[in-house]
Amino acid sequence: MAKKKININEILRFISKQAGKVIPAKQLIQLESPVFLPFYHVVSDEQLPHIQNYPYRNVQEFENELDFFLKHFKPVELGELINSKNYSEKVFHLTFDDGLKECAEIIAPVLLQKGIPATFFINTAFADNLQLFHKYKASLILNTLKERPNEFAEKRLEDNGLRGYNILKAEIWQNDLLDEVAELLGIYFQDFLTKEQPYLTTSQILKLQSEGFSIGAHSVDHPEFYKISAKQQMEQVRKSMDWIAEKINPQIKTFSFPFTDSGVPASILKTIRDENLCDITFGTAGVKYDVFDFHFQRYPMEQNGNVASQLKSEYVYFQLRKWIGKAKVKH
């Protein structure tokens, strides 16, 4: 019988969780580590039908987490990240992906009240509610199937490996299938966009900018970046950054990779740098350094569990990876 291969990351994660339970947060966070970059998508007390099958924070949870950040870190502007290695104190910068309307209606007022700067990343094809993200389409379909099972729709999904909750794993290339199934169920995505207006409008984005927030691109239509070609990746970066430049004209050019930057080759980041397409870019690998000094790794906040426990575990994990020489993301 073949021996099971030891997964070093699983071992480090287990140790991190156990150690994080007993080590004080202040003691961990004060150790040498990268700038802390927590990111979210949405905050709401409402049950948002296009997002309710994915985790997100309510307003009180969000405010509690912000207070935790403020206790242990100093909030900084986007432009200050370039010099973050020179800080004598721990700093953080908040970011939000997907450009949902709650960014303007709920999140920004809370941040302004607490004096916390942030960056909002926009999927340019979705701005002004022109298109709907395929993951949000999947959520709306799942909701309907729970209420009104449909044999034909479920068969089409099952034939494509999307039975039940697996529909949430649908990818951008399955957009036509989602549209077909939605029609079978009497779901009209354009009507949903018109009625619910889930995304920020250009005027809302400009208002956020006028309030001091930074605006960046999050690709055109949020594809699974690690599954498209390098040529397509560059097209997504260029087109979305062109839209941001034309509509918003930000002082700092910034881009966050959709889903993850894992699978994005070094050549893409080199092109972004060499062509001066962006000043700062972001991945989602957690508390880690990156081989490119303008590319920063963010920490996903929308996870189950207490924020203090999450972060303590993450910081122990970083220290363990640093100890074995793997605290820096390579591409």
Image (cartoon, rainbow, N blue to C red):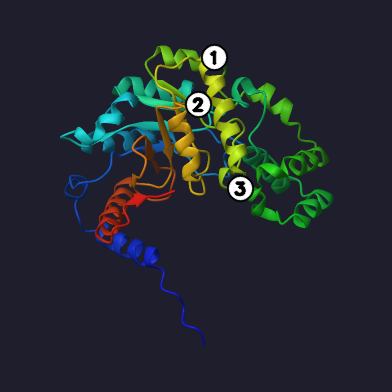
Residue 230 falls in image quadrant: top right
- Density class for disc 3 (Cα within 10 Å; few <14, some 14-19, many ≥20) is few
Q: CA distance from mark 2 to mark 1?
A: 20 Å
* CB under 8 Å between discs 3 and 2: no
Question: Is residue 117 or residue 195 the one in the foreground?
Answer: 117
* CB under 8 Å between discs 3 and 1: no
Kind of residue sitting beneath label 3: Lys
Q: CA distance from mark 3 to mark 1?
A: 29 Å
* Numbered tag placed on residue 102 in the rendering: 2
Q: Nearer the viewer, mark 3 or mark 2?
A: 3
Residue 274 picture location, percent across and down = 44, 31
Tell me if I can see residue 43 in this picture: no
Question: Is residue 318 or residue 309 the one in the foreground?
Answer: 318
Kind of residue sitting beneath label 2: Glu
Return the disc, 2 or 1, that comes first in the chain's sequence: 2
Q: CA distance from mark 3 to mark 2?
A: 29 Å
2 sits left or right of 189 in the view = left
Question: Is residue 135 or residue 279 the one in the foreground?
Answer: 279
As displayed, is residue 146 above or below residue 81?
A: below
28 sits left or right of 167 in the view = left
Return the disc, 3 or 1, that comes first in the chain's sequence: 3
* Numbered tag placed on residue 247 in the rendering: 1
153 sits left or right of 256 in the view = right
Residue 172 picture location, percent across and down = 67, 42
Residue 63 falls in image quadrant: top left
As displayed, is residue 67 above or below residue 177?
A: above
Q: Secondary structure at mark 1?
A: helix
Residue for badge 3:
227
